[in-house]
Structures are given as structure tokens and as C-alpha cells.
Amino acid sequence: MIFSRLSVRVNSGSVTTVNSPVLVALSRGALVGIFAVGLLAIISGLLDLSDSGNDTPSFLIFGTLITICCAYLTRYVSEKKLNRSESFLAVTSGFLSSILCSSFIYLFMTDEKNFANALFESTAAFTTTSLTVIDFGMSGNGLIFYRTASQLFGSFAAILLAVMVLPIADNNSRSLTSGRHATQETFPDRRKALKSIASIYLVSIVLLTLTLLTTPVDFFEALLLSISSISTGGFSISSEHFGNSSVQLLLSAGMITTGMSILVIWRLVSGKIYSAIRSSELHAYFLLIVVASLLLFLWSDEGGTSSLSSSLFIALASISTTGFHIPPFGNWSEATAFLLLFLVTVGPMSLSNGGGFQIHRLRILIAVSFRELVRQLHPRAVVKIIIGDESIKEERVREVVVFQFLFTSVIFLTAIALTISGMSMYEGVSSSITAISTAGPIRNAEGVIIEVSSFSVGERLALLPAMISGRLYLIPVLISIGYLLSEARTFLRPRRRLLQAMRSDPR
């Protein structure tokens, strides 16, 4: 039921808590998401003291108030265990609450007075989509750090969802595939997964920041670039450093790492090097990087090591869906633009920080296509789908086919909405692919970057559902919507609501 309550007697008296599964999931997710925004605001306010400190009072007051309120309100939410659908609803609720709460920071602490633009900026930050409509050139260090760190929060939340919630939910239904079995072997419980992933993020950012200090980049800019690279957010207040070959190579190393599966990275740092390098998906990932970089280098028709470095940098920014804003170089052809669009669509390895369709799903889809062709020639043949050393079960095949349908459907619907508003077909498709892959920037057929600030308010709002669903891997968002609709239908039918209440009554 949507509404129910439970009286719990504590030392201070009787406290009425929210006990409805729907409201518990919504409340728990919202409180966690808003609490994270408040904590991030406090950190940003303290960091703003390194600059003018003008935004410090606003950040500290806002952050302190909402963190205290969230901590206090948790006592009114039941601690009951959530099932799979309710867990997805909690994650979606937390993500949306973070975006909405963060929008008010951009609305009140920048020159932006349009809430739609503030909402778009907040969504782009938390979904790690390399798009922006607010000029941060005159902002203090605190606000710039908040915009950059929001990407890290969104990326961290998404990878935790992929590693912790999805495998555990499937384990409850006893339908684990071999890939998810490997996930649970590496991270057997949530606490270990949280510590391990947080350690990987922290160490990667620290190492990349320290190595960037060997270039002409100062500490604050090095920290921002490191966070943007590791989180695949791609946000930067200036692109002048991207012309430096040393900066390009160091950021390329960061993007290679962030595009790798978290399982492969953990095996490497745990000393299981042979197990990590045997990953066939890792081989496909590096092959895609090499081929894409060589094609960009050959098509640019410039030659020289600087052109090769730029080709590698742009290819990695697309494959990892980081989306650093690099202007076209050399003889930029339409084939180059389509290649980058293809790389953004495919994306990096599964269980990585990046978005997109991801390499493992694409390989399964290609294998399914070949299997169906063989079956047309030999109807009685039994053809197993084997990717590397892994035999893919039919349950996993169905998941990939469903994901493909949802992925293309979101692209199609978003592109239709954009073309109706007057956008060209290529730019509409490019924008929708960029949004659902949480990549960037949006380019036209000539490779020129299209600023999102030139879009109308309706066009920017049309990108938001694709950005949010793409960052949360589509399935959790759609399951959350379906679960809410199912519960709402039950609530609107008194007889069904009465029967559920009678079944749930302990007496």
C-alpha cells in the first residue's frame, strides 16, 4: 500500500514512522540524496575559503541546515528491508532528489535566474554528462568545485548501483549469470564493495592530480581535471590546457582507467594480474581504442606526434564518455563525426564509470546475430553463445535484447522531440545519443561543438529523461516507474487496497 503507518515505542515515547514500502523507499532515497548534497555543500564552502570566500556562508548555512534536517527525519522512516523494485525506487528517488536540491544552489548562487537552466546544469553534473549552460568563469572556487564534485557523486552512485544493488537483487531471485557471479565473488558484501570502490576513486584522483602537477597546470585546476576525468564528467572551466601534449597523455591515462571495469581494476590492485589481463572484454576495449585512434590520426591528415596524441585524446574522451570539449583539428571529415558518434554509443567496458551501450552487451548482441544467421542455415543446430571464456545464458541474452530495445527507444523518442522543435535530424540524433550515453560534447556533422546554451528551454528539458535514465542504466528507472504505477493503481481501487490491508494485518 502507498500509505500506512507504524507506531514504534522508544525511550522518549511513541514515534509514528513511515511504514508503507513505497513511502519508505521514496523517503529513504530522498533523505540520502539530499544529505549528500548538504555534505558536498559544506565541503565546497570550506574550500571556497581558498579563494574569495564570498560563497562560504551560503554554502555552510545551506549544507548544515539540510544535513541536520535529513538526519533528524530519518527517525520517522521505518528500517524495514526493501525488495528489488523498492530498492530501485529508493535509488531513483535519491538521484532525483539530489538533482532537484542542487538546482537551488545554482539558482541562488549564480547569475542564472531561470530554474530550467539551473535544473539542466544540476542534471548534467550528477549524470556526468559533459554539457553546461552556466558560465562559471567568474565564479569562486567553492562553486566550481561543487559543480565538478557533483560529477563524482553521480558516478560513484551509479557504479555502486551496478555493483551492489543489481547483483544482490538478482541473487535474491536466484538467477545470477556468470558475470554477476564474478561480481559477487569480488565484492561479497555491500560494505566491502563500498570501501573498495571508494578507495579506487580516491587513489585514482590523488595519483592523477599529483602527476598533472608536473605540467603547467596549477593544483586546483589539476584537481578539477582529475575529478572530471575519473568521474567521466568532462567538465572544465577552460579548455586551454587540452592543447598541451603532456596534459593530454596524463588525462588519456586517467580516461583509460575510468573506462575499465571496476572488477578488472580491483583484480589488478589485488595482485590478480593474470586473471585481470585474461578478460576478453579488456582486449576488445584496448583494440577499440587503438583502431579508433589510428583512424582519427589518418583521417586528420596532419601527421606528427601532437596529432597522434590529440587523436588518442579525442578517441578516449568519446569511448569513456568523458566528453572533454576539444575543438576539431586537421581535415575533419563527416566520417570522423560518425566515428565519434559510434564510439559514444558503444561506450567503455561494463561495470565502468562510463555510460553508453557498453562493450560486453555489444559483443553479446553481435554473437546473437551470428547465432540467428546460423540457425537460418541449420534450423536444428544448437549454438551456444560464448564470449571469451564465458558461456552466456539465455536469461542474460534476453536482458541484453531488452536493454537494446529500451536504449534505442529512448534515443528515438528523444530525437523525435528535438526534431519537432526544429532541430536537424543529425543534430537531434547526436544530441539524444550524447544524452543517454552521458557523454559530450554535442557536435554537428563537421565536428563543430554545438553549445547547449543555444538550445531552447524545451529542447534542453527534452534531454533530461535520457540523461537520468542513461546514468542509472535504464532498467532501474523503468522498474521504479512501473512499480509506482502499479501501486498507484492499487491505491485508486478501494477493494484491492482493503484486501492488501487485511493480508498485511498481523492480527
Image (tube, rainbow, N blue to C red):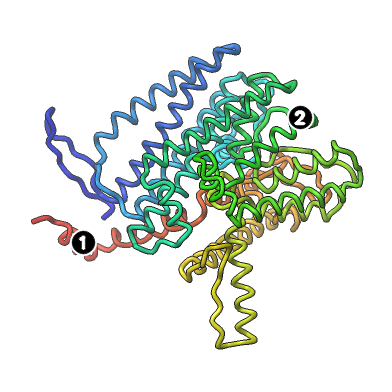
Question: Is residue 326 rendered to the left or right of residue 8?
Answer: right
Q: Nearer the viewer, residue 169 or 198?
A: 198
Position of 312 relative to 206 (above/below)? below
Q: Quadrant of residue 450?
A: top right
Q: Is residue 40 left or right of residue 466?
A: left
Query: Which quarter of the rendering shows the N terminus?
Result: bottom left
Kind of residue at badge 2: Ser
Residue name at image x 40 percent, y 31 percent: 35
- Tag 1: amino acid: Gln
Q: Position of residue 164 (x, y in %)?
A: 41, 47
What residue lies at 54% left-to-right and 47% top-to-bottom? Answer: 264
Mark with earlier residue (2, 1): 2
Q: How many marks?
A: 2
Residue 500: mark in rendering:
1
Please tell me which residue is depicted at 30% across the width and 45% down the height of the picture.
Answer: 24
- Asked if residue 370 is positioned above or below residue 39 in the image, the reply reads below
The residue shown at (69%, 28%) is: 237
**Residue 187 visible within the image:** yes
Residue indicated by mark 2 = 246
Q: Is residue 64 left or right of residue 494?
A: right
Which labelled disc corresponds to residue 191? Answer: none
Which image quarter is the C terminus in? Answer: bottom left
Alpha carbons under labels 2 and 1: distance apart: 64 Å
- Element under label 1? helix
Q: Residues within 10 Å of mark 2 (few under 14, many from 20)?
A: some
Above-or-below relation of 207 to 428? above
Mark 2 or mark 1, whichever is nearer to me: 2
Instruction: Decide: few, some or many residues near mark 1? Use Cα within 10 Å; few <14, some 14-19, many ≥20.
Output: some
Q: Position of residue 482 (x, y in %)?
A: 41, 60
